[in-house]
Amino acid sequence: MQVKFKDANLKRKYDSLSDTMRSMRSAIVAYSGGVDSTLVAVVAHENLGDKAIIVTANSASLAPSEFSELLKIAGELKFNHRVIYTKEVESSEYKANTSQRCYFCKEELYTELKTLASKENIPWITNGTNVDDLGDFRPGIKAAKDFIIRSPLVEVGINKDEVRAIAKEINISNWDKPAQACLSSRVAYGIKITDSILNKISLAEEHVKSFGISQVRVRHHGNLARIEVPEQQISILLDKDNNKNITERLKKLG
């Protein structure tokens, strides 16, 4: 793809990312639907064609609406896309919901991707980790290191703002998509993860979104639900009728 970047630094990093992907010859991209992994998937697809297998892991921890959206994008971009079904929520270590929960999630994912890579004779597995992620507490990054997963965005020094800027320049439709962690991230540490809880959270968030909220997280604290929305949309929740409707719906969900 020939792209005319307004920013020379962005072009240099985009070209470097392309070179990195081409050097792999074939690769699996762990594609979650977020802008980071979408960018890696797009560049892999452009430079490796069908030798880039774009893989999404579906499970109870992924909101159905998120899954539908990423399928749409994968179709639009004509990825060589596959869906696998992971069972992290069945793991006792994952269910325990300690601060290491994300490690066990990625352990399940990367185990499945390693099996696929071996079957398809693909040398590399990649993810969408960017430079800014390295400064956060992310047990999933340790899992990536343990499984020798490559992070092309980190390798070429691309941060979150640059991911969005590059994605916008090359017309990736979700370039401004808000960060969206898995449903289990809404559950306070120490509360056991169950399919029932994850389903309640998913339904609650979809209901809140129906009022015109662009981004929402309904955090589960046992008998208490905490709703987080962008600051400029708080007034929607404070509307008397909306507040009553949402409160009644969440109570019905338990």
Image (cartoon, rainbow, N blue to C red):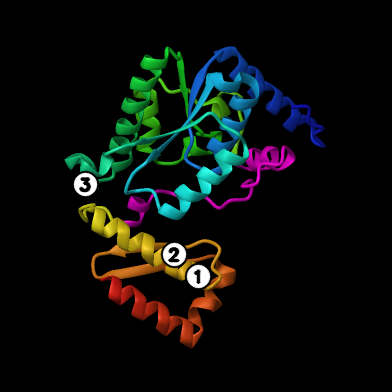
Residues tagged 1 and 2 counted as in contact (Cβ below 8 A): yes
Whether residue 94 is in magenta: the answer is no
Q: Secondary structure at mark 1?
A: loop
**How many residues crowd around disc 2 within 10 Å: few (fewer than 14), some, or many (20 or more)?**
some
- Pinpoint residue 121: horizontal percent, then vertical percent: 42, 12
Q: Report the number of discs.
A: 3
User: Which mark lies nearer to you, 3 or 2?
Assistant: 2
Quadrant into which the N terminus falls: top right
Q: Which residue is mark 3?
A: 95
- Disc 1: which residue: 210
Identified by mark 3, the residue type is: Lys
The answer to if 171 sits in the magenta stretch is yes
**In the image: residue 128, left or right of residue 149:** right
Q: How far separated are the C-alphas under marks 3 and 2?
A: 24 Å
Circle 2 is placed at which residue position?
A: 206
Query: In the image, is 214 to the left or to the right of 3?
Result: left
- Disc on the earlier residue, 3 or 2: 3
